[in-house]
Amino acid sequence: MSVCTRRIITGELSSPIARYHIPVTKLPAVRSPDYLSSTSVRHFISNTRRPNSIVSRSTRTKFYVIAVAESTGVFRRGGRDGGENGEWRTRRRCAVGDQVVEINENRKSSNRLAEVAVAATATVVLGVGNRVLYKLALVPLKNYPFFLAQLATFGYVLVYFSILYVRYHTGKITDEMLSLPKIPYVAVGLLEALAAASGMAAGAILSGATIPVLSQSFLVWQLLLSFIFLGRRYRLNQLFGCFLVSVGVIVTVASGSSAGSLMEGGVFWSLLMIVSFLLQAADTVLKEVIFLDAAKRLKGGTVDLFVVNSFGSAYQAVFICLLLPFLSKLWGVPFTQLPNYLRDGAACFLNIGTLSSGCAGAPLLPLLFIIVNMGYNISLLHLLKISSAVLSCLASTVSVPISVFLFTLPLPYLGVASSLPPGFISGAIILVIGMLVYTWRPSSRLKNQEVDCHC
């Protein structure tokens, strides 16, 4: 009898989205009682029409998951809790743990963890650059912040669809991706437009120290919405880690502000800002749903993120146009004067004409902000695609205290540097501890265990 060796990595998968990239979840899962006889398991394997299968029982869901392997069937008999009391049996020798098994010849599991780590780091770096450059971009456009917002909104549509066109003609985007239902993209555009409108309205009233504190509700909404709509179940250490991250950001940013300054905006505007973050959280969770649904419709494939970005940005621009009378009023620009305002903003942005005297730094600083902001949005969506909405939110949150620290440095165009808040160090320590607590996993004998399966 010939003998061959296959290397098997056991352990939890990185995310529900990532599961669509490996053979495990493409295969059927059958609900089973706590005890399943070896005869019935063999019968199931023989009727799956998959000649190469492994049966692995998940202790969380009470499912037997069938995964592709070499020409052998592996099953467990006995052991109600899936623990060591059971016995693995197979026609050929193979030892596997009691969790979901991932067949991985090229260490796909390790590669995916590395990919998530790199994407999260890139998101944090670009998030910091996004916050700092936005402050710098407003130096030449201090009288035209609404122009900068609209330039970014409508500029993204042009850039994203240009990239979409190139990727389509190079074969990276298929007709199947473009034929996916467009209603979710309409919902994405609507949520982003409403989030921008409510955030602008509340941000015009609330103090600068209040907004970062209220922004921590974004993480709470992420956890709640992913629990409801994605069926996520979080471990206690993950919930506690998210709590510590939020506390760390609040302590870092708001420690130098008095309680009066935090509440001076009023309850209504604070609640409106919280609603704005609810809409943003719903937007990110909806994008995760889009990726999950696309993986099913594309039979295990994934939709290119520029498809999601392009159509989402296009519908956002449509709804922004419908809300322009309301939004221009929020920025103190009467709608009848909006054409003149945009013309003067364009002149300042290009640093030409009689209005260019107070526009030093343009167009370099605004362009740098737009480029980095675009990269940040792409990186954030990529991280969401390969991990989860909660992890992308945590990566974005970490950028807040780093940005606060950078503003204490002598940056060009900003004048006198600000001082560190009194609780910056303690808040940063709490935040780091929260991230470590969130990423900690209980030790398991199955975690990343390599098993040689001889067949």
Image (cartoon, grey):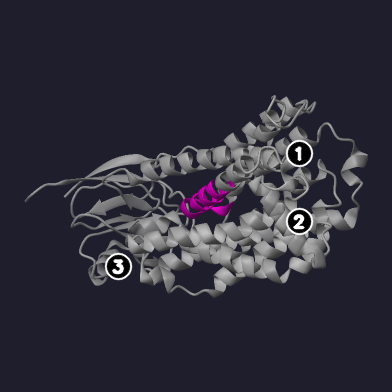
Residue beneath the point at 48% across and 62% down: 161
Three-letter amino acid code at the position of disc 1: Ile
Amino acid at the residue labelled 2: Gly
Q: Which residue is mark 3?
A: 40
Which amino acid, by three-letter code, is at mark 3? Ser
Residue at horizontal 37%, vertical 45%?
A: 109
Mark before the other along the chain sequence, 3 or 2: 3
| Closer to the eye: label 3 or 1 | 1
> Residue at the spot x=56%, y=44% of the render?
372
Disc 2 packing (10 Å; few <14; some 14–19; many ≥20): many
Nearest the viewer among 52 and 145 is 145
Residue beneath label 1, please? 250
> Residue 260 appears in which quarter of the rendering?
top right
Main SS, magenta region, reads helix
Q: What residue span does the magenta drawing correspond to?
A: 373-389
Which secondary structure, mark 1?
helix
Going from the N terminus, do you reach mark 2 or mark 1 first? 2
Q: CA distance from mark 3 to mark 2?
A: 58 Å
Q: Which residue carries the number 2 mark?
A: 199
154 part of magenta stretch: no
